[in-house]
Amino acid sequence: MRNPLSKTVVDIQPSGIRKFFDIVSDMKNAISLGVGEPDFDTPWHIREEGIYSLERGRTFYTSNAGLKDLKIQICNYLKRRLELHYNPALEIVVTIGGSEAIDIALRAMLDIGDEVLIPQPSYVSYLPCVTLAGGKPVIIELKAKDQFRLTKEELLDAVTDKTKVLILPFPNNPTGAIMEYDDLADIVKIVEEKDIFVISDEIYSELTYGTKHVSIAEFPGMKERTILINGFSKSYAMTGWRLGYAAGPENIIEQMIKIHQFAIMCAPTTSQYAAIEALKNGDSDVEMMRDAYDQRRRFLVHALREMGLDCFEPYGAFYVFPCIKSLGMTSDEFATALLKEEKVAVVPGTAFGDCGEGFLRISYAYSIENLKVALERMERFVKKHKGQPPVH
């Protein structure tokens, strides 16, 4: 029998995030600090709107691009938050989470061999989605000394005549890094000069601390060459509702909708009605959750530094990215030993790219109580292993 499997798919490695949490699920008294999922329930008024839509029998397909009212509310949100003006009928598509939006944007834009610049460490889906779309991933290694921001020098070094798309993953998962106005201004000049398109993943845009999120699409001339991706999972604690969206130029969105039409049909109707309520009346919920994350962020950074680990201060998302090189272990060795000895699960930095070696991703989307217990265990582990040979 011939091999039934695609070599391209077989060669793609599974997500490095899941390994530890499959173990945690069967481990008594284990604490997981790795899953990027809010510990808050979806606000009740949003859930209530979803329930009401079911009670009204709204279980039909929506249009492929999404409910008209939802697309209008998305445009209102982008105007309110970013002063960006989109046509809801032509420049918005509602997707199954931000992840589908990333996938179909790449498939709509890439021809075989087109190069896509991927700053890493970053979200695990970018590289496989580029590969599945026939593109060539080109990795830009972000550095701790730059607070894991993309610099103009790094971008210029990576650009070739085959470069078509730059993925801009800020606020960043896993580092918590952000790009401020001046950082983006340098990037804009290169993007325009080299005629590159941008996929800007802004799923954590509402979760920034001490500074307002800036989108590259806000710069003059950039809305026309940017696909802005966002969603409801992180900001509104709606991970299981599986709802995201993309905003961008009509000619690109039109092709994204075509792929979405054949592969998905439409995003879940119940989720779309709930999302309308989230955008209309959810600002105070976002503010409450952001304040809670900020408290946890400051607590976690302080605790990690107190135990002797280098940790730059993140200003976005809900992750810290401490350096564990001083312990003489690889990221995988540290995470494996910490789980085995102290029953605390974190994610090795290498799950987000090879340049994540020597770092860990720790999520603070957990209660202060859980964080305190986990950090006590982690501190005990660090004290035990400091100055000892690597664990194998």
Image (spheres, rainbow, N blue to C red):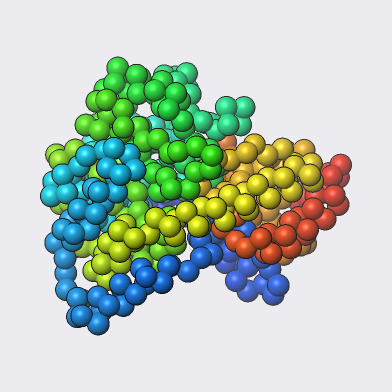
Kindly identify the residue that appears in the image at 36 percent across and 36 percent down.
Answer: 215
Q: Residue 59, located in which quarter of the rendered image?
A: bottom left
Instruction: Check the image and report above or below for 327 versus 146.
Output: below
Residue 205 location, x and y as percent? Answer: 42, 45
Kindly identify the residue that appears in the image at 51 percent across and 30 percent down.
Answer: 149
Res 301 seen here: yes
How many numbered discs?
0
Q: Residue 281, located in which quarter of the rendered image?
A: bottom left
Q: Is residue 227 left or right of residue 251?
A: right
Kindly identify the residue that appears in the image at 51 percent across and 65 percent down.
Answer: 40
Kindly identify the residue that appears in the image at 63 percent across and 67 percent down.
Answer: 24
Residue 332 location, x and y as percent? Answer: 66, 49
Instruction: Check the image and report above or below for 267 versus 256.
Output: below
Q: Is residue 260 left or right of residue 325?
A: left
Looking at the picture, tell me which residue is in the foreground, 202 or 49. Answer: 49
Residue 154 location, x and y as percent? Answer: 47, 22
Instruction: Check the image and report above or below for 322 versus 236.
Output: above
Q: Residue 349, located in which quarter of the rendered image?
A: top right
Res 255 seen here: no
Quadrant where the N terminus lies?
bottom left
Looking at the picture, tell me which residue is in the foreground, 134 or 166. Answer: 166
